[in-house]
Image: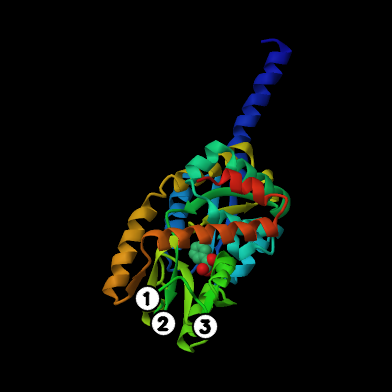
Amino acid sequence: MKKTTMLAAMAATAVAAILPSLAAAQETTLKVVSAFAENSAYVKRLENWIERLNAEGKGVLQLQFIGGPKAMPSFEVGNAVKTGVVDIGLSTGAFYTNVMPEADALKLTRIPVAEQRKNGALAYIQKIWNEKGNMYYLARVVEHQPFHIYLNKKIDKPDLSGLKIRITPVYRDFFSALGAQVMQTAPGEVYTALERGVVDGYGWPVGGIFDLNWHEKTKYRVDPGFYDAEVSLVVNLTRWKALSPKQRAFLQQQGLNFEGRNDFWKAYAQEEIKRQAAAGIQTIRFEGAVARQYVERAYAEGWAGAIKASPQHGPKLKELFGK
Ligand code: 173
């Protein structure tokens, strides 16, 4: 054997000997927090996803679920991801408008996320999230969940004047335009606000009102729903970039797998509607032209707000979010 070949062979043996320990040392664990309650469907699915990911990611990447709003207040998760206090957040844009006003616009998408990945919408979101939020937008894991108004008092037309309604940024422009007196709270404060009569109703998606027992204090759901609830996984961008190409590819693929199971939410919406009816919650249903105008008003007010909040990106997002 020539001397150089011999040296190369020895070097290869040495590398092979230390590789397993190197690989083990390269396994990274990322911390995940949720802005939504521990017992919600959002978080149950998150935990299932993490379990599978950890089984498949041995030696590559592991996720550790820290908890929900008991571990960190809902409206702080976005900023915690931005600054790297946590590595991954499960949250919705409405909860982190303090990071960037564009975040709340994700509720206005009228095409599924699979299509957003094809038409450039997601690439545009990615750029904003990277630049303004120091976040990598990994996956949208809730879709097909329109928002509704839930009330204790009856209305017979799209008019909320004289009513106090619990909101987040999601509903502010629309409910204000309908005449409501609005009051922002985290989900964790809704029950008490209803109980004390501080509010006459609240905005929430079609699913999830049983998780914090709001059904006990809810008499009506107003139909139709409007917008599409967005809940996504966002990753601290610095941490994302520090992962190896293999770890990034693995996490991205896992995120896409999760996103690919969003049809679940269609069935969940139907189940929740039935469950609400069984719990005695009545439907106030606008019909025909009134219903159409109600929904179009929601989008018109929502986009006016989004464009005002971000003259720079609002118009482009509107173009990309479809209809
Ligand atoms: O009502 C809310 O707290 C809210 O904004 C929201 C957004 C996405 C999913 C669920 C709730």
Q: Residue at x 53, y 76 (%)?
A: 166
Q: CA distance from mark 2 to mark 3?
A: 11 Å
Count the labels in the image: 3
Mark 2 or 3: in front is: 3
Q: Earlier in the sequence, mark 2 or mark 1?
A: 2
The circle drawn on residue 162 is 3
Q: Residue at x 58, y 61 (%)?
A: 301
Does the rendering let one see residue 105? yes
Residue contact at pointers 2 and 1, CB within 8 angstroms? yes
Q: Earlier in the sequence, mark 2 or mark 3?
A: 2
Q: What amino acid type is highlighted by mark number 3?
A: Gly
- Helix, strand or loop at label 3? It is loop
Which image quadrant: the N terminus? top right
**Mark 3 surroundings: few (<14), some (14-19) or many (≥20) residues within 10 A:** few
Ligand 1 within 8 Å of the CB at mark 3: no
The circle drawn on residue 220 is 1
x, y percentage for residue 289? 40, 59
- Residue situated furthest front in the rendering: 289
Q: Residue at x 47, y 46 (%)?
A: 112
Ligand 1 within 8 Å of the CB at mark 1: no
Compared across the picture, whether 233 is left or right of 241 comes to left
Position of 260 relative to 174 (above/below): above
The residue indicated by pointer 2 is 153
Q: CA distance from mark 1 to mark 3?
A: 17 Å
Q: What amino acid type is highlighted by mark number 2?
A: Lys
x, y percentage for residue 255? 51, 46
x, y percentage for residue 73? 59, 72
